[in-house]
Amino acid sequence: MEDFYALASVDYQHLAEAIDWKTWLETRQEAVGSRCLRLLDVACGSGKFPAALVSHANVANAAIKPVDYALLDPSSFSISEARQALTSPFRAGAEYEMTLQDLECHPGSFDIVWATHALYAIPHNELETALKRMVDAMGRDGKTDNGGAGFIAHASAQSHYLQFFQHYLSGFKGGVGAPYSSSEQIITMLTQMGLALEIKEISYTNGAPEAKERQVERYLQRCLFDDTVSLKEMLSNPVTGPYLETCRKNGMWQFAQHVTMIFVNAATASEEK
């Protein structure tokens, strides 16, 4: 995982620097008044996003109360890692060792629900259910006129994460297997649910010196959730090999990412229920 995050940590830094998160959290705090914000991190992983917000977005100095930070992930190890990574203003709260599809909670249980690079592997026929669970969690609580706020960071169809996985399915799995979901698909589903969305696109590269073969290998394996395929096999494969060669430039590995930041207002969907 450390080799993966040696390249992937830039994903979260770019998200943290893309908007004024300090003001964003302060606005959410004003909406709930004197109590603490309740936040759910979907597929929390190792807690890299809240850590990036502290390191790069100055949220530790936000005029907010401690954030009650709930962790959802099917992996108990990831929940433990994320819990240990949390620092002020985030305070570890409830734990949900499950998939997003299995989450059941009262509407308005959370003021904020976010999922950062977290929804790729959800089967396409379950994606709508998962998104509805997410929206329900930040829906109206019956006591106020406002729903909660949601945030999804997800790569587009043109991003390395999706393109490489599609090449992997073709090159190693005979084309069998579900491709990763794209930000375009998520936006379509949320729009069909009647949600008001704000969209921001960011582009950058995950990079490493060409000599860092082991680090790059572990990064690429994690992109595929398959640690059985070596970098040598990836490069010699007639499908993944030519793609990876396009990612080597001037002695550097450069994996181009195009990520969509999707901000969700749950109130609009709640009104239609």
Image: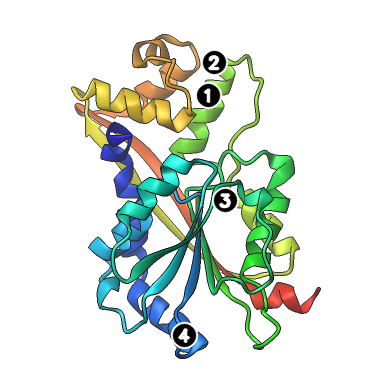
Q: Nearer the viewer, residue 202 or 70?
A: 70
Please tell me in which quadrant of the rendered image residue 124 appears: top right
Say which residue appears at 68% left-offset and 66% top-offset: 136
Where is residue 142 shown, x and y percent of the image? 71, 83
Image disc number at residue 215: none
Q: Amino acid at mark 3?
A: Ser
Quadrant of the image for the C terminus? bottom right
Q: Assign a secondary structure to mark 3.
A: helix
Q: State which mark lies toward you, 1 or 4.
A: 4
Q: Assign a secondary structure to mark 2.
A: helix
Please tell me in which quadrant of the rendered image residue 77 appears: top left
Q: Amino acid at mark 4?
A: Arg
Where is residue 6 shown, x and y percent of the image? 26, 38
Residue picked out by circle 2: 171
Establish if 114 lies above or below 141: above
Residue picked out by circle 3: 183
Residue picked out by circle 1: 167
CB under 8 Å between discs 1 and 4: no
Q: Is residue 97 visible?
A: yes
Residue picked out by circle 4: 35
CB under 8 Å between discs 1 and 2: yes
Q: Amino acid at mark 2?
A: Gly
